Amino acid sequence: MIDQVLYRDFRGDGSLVMVVPQRLVSHDKRGILAWRPIDTPYLFRRTVDGRDRREIPFRERHTAQWQLAPMTWTGLHVLHLFRPDHAHSVWWMFNPDFSLNRWYVNLEAPPAPWRDGDLAGIDTFDHALDIVVPPDRTWRWKDEDEYQERIGHPAYWSEDGAKEIRAEGERVVADIEAGRFPFDGTWTDFRPDPAWPLPELPLRAGTGRGAASKPIRQASAGTDSSSIRWD
């Protein structure tokens, strides 16, 4: 029985940027719903001297030496919905008292679920552009500069790809403004089972021996997650 999934973010060149263990909450036609509480351990790419990517000019990043560094999730709890055949995921970001702080729309490649023995996860490719949505459903774009600077880079997206990313965001904006699912109040009252332990990073999540540099099994983009059996 799978009770945890690994959220893994890759780049177009196959490099792994982030690995986050999350508790599997549900898996149905709406998608895969997972829980990431404050204090969850995760791995995030940093330079060997400890710098974050934002501290390095974009054009210089390909020459930097990177590694996956252990981190701890802080600030807000996250309820994370991966939607089959949608090029985005939606985060309900809760304050420590479980009141809704905001929704966060992460534009990314459609989820590619996988399973390898007792491990299961979802691989994706972040599209840089995001949407921040307060509880009153006003909204704003986030990281437009990062989205723009990647256009034409071989590890990211072409001009046409950039247009598709923006169009996906505009489709989500229409749902936000209309108050349609998942911005209709669904799961805003979510509370985790107090008996749930913190998600854990398994040794095979990518720690050591180069295992972090490639997927355990990369599913094709657009895989319908409702067809993947994890039980």
Image (cartoon, rainbow, N blue to C red):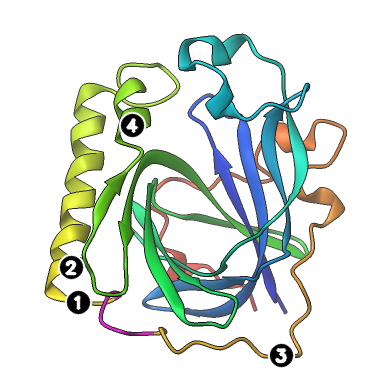
Residue 58: percent from the left, percent from the top? 47, 17
Mark 3 and 4 residues: CB-CB less than 8 Å, in contact? no
Circles 4 and 2: CB atoms closer than 8 Å: no
Residue type indicated by callout 4: Tyr
Q: Earlier in the sequence, mark 1 or mark 2?
A: 2
Mark 1–mark 2 CB contact (< 8 Å): yes
Specify start and end residues of the magenta stretch as a single range: 182-186
Q: CA distance from mark 4 to mark 2?
A: 22 Å
Q: Decide whether the magenta segment is chiefly helix, strand or loop.
A: loop
For marks 3 and 4, the one nearer the N-term is 4
Q: Where residue 194 is drawn, which disc sits there?
A: 3
Q: Earlier in the sequence, mark 3 or mark 1?
A: 1
Q: Which mark is residue 175?
A: 2
Residue type marked 2: Asp
Q: Position of residue 222 (x, y in %)?
A: 37, 51
Counting from the top left corner in percent of width and height, residue 31 is at 42, 72
Residue topped by disc 4:
147
Q: Is residue 37 visible?
A: yes
The residues bearing labels 2 and 3 have C-alpha atoms spaced at a distance of: 32 Å
Is mark 1 in CB contact (under 8 Å) with mark 4? no
Q: Nearer the viewer, residue 139 or 225?
A: 139
